[in-house]
Image: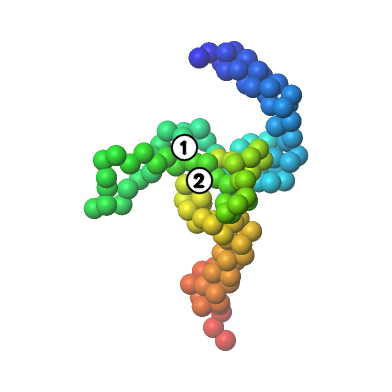
Amino acid sequence: MTWDDAKQRQSAITEICEKDGLHDRQKLTTIRILSKLGHTICPLCLEELSSNGFFNRLEQAEGRAVPDLTVTQLNLFHIQELRIGVFNHRPYNLAWGHHHCNVVVKDSGIEETLEWMSRVLQRNTAEGHFGPKKSAS
């Protein structure tokens, strides 16, 4: 595909999304799908995503490798976590994110996971295992 073909395809897809109410950039930014610059980001770590992540399979731990692993670095990520009896596969609730970040969030949701991570960092920092070392008094 040439650069011009790619731009034409992007314009056509954007036009369809706008027509169907699926291109609210402010909403996409607020719910952690796009950065303030309009770049696709992981909903948990907020790191910009690269298209290479769709093609790169996860590295496997030595001794635990399987020949048929098909999990890539990026996969679908629910902004609001899955709940029984709730329709979660809807526009503005599915994003692309890092496989590892998605595993960390699992069923807890992004906000609850960030709160947990904050407590983990506070405890580790208080014990001297993370962050600036406490000065000896």
Element type at mark 2 = strand
Q: Are marks 2 and 1 in contact (CB under 8 Å)?
A: yes
Q: Is residue 41 visible?
A: no
Query: In the displayed image of the protein, which residue is found farthest to the front?
Result: 85
| Location of residue 10 in the rendering, given as x and y in whole percent from the top left corner | 62, 21
The answer to whether residue 28 is above or below residue 107 is: above
Mark 2: amino acid: His
Q: Which mark is residue 53?
A: 1
Q: At 63% across and 40% down in the image, what residue appears?
A: 90
Q: Residue at x 27, y 45 (%)?
A: 66
Residue 27 visible in the picture: yes
- Label placed on residue 132: none
Q: CA gap, disc 2 to disc 1? A: 8 Å
Q: Nearer the viewer, residue 35 or 71?
A: 71
Nearest to N terminus: mark 2 or mark 1: 1
38 to 5, vertically: above or below: below
Would you identify the image quadrant in which residue 49 lies?
top right
- The foreground one among 73 and 76 is 76
Mark 1 is on which residue type? Gly
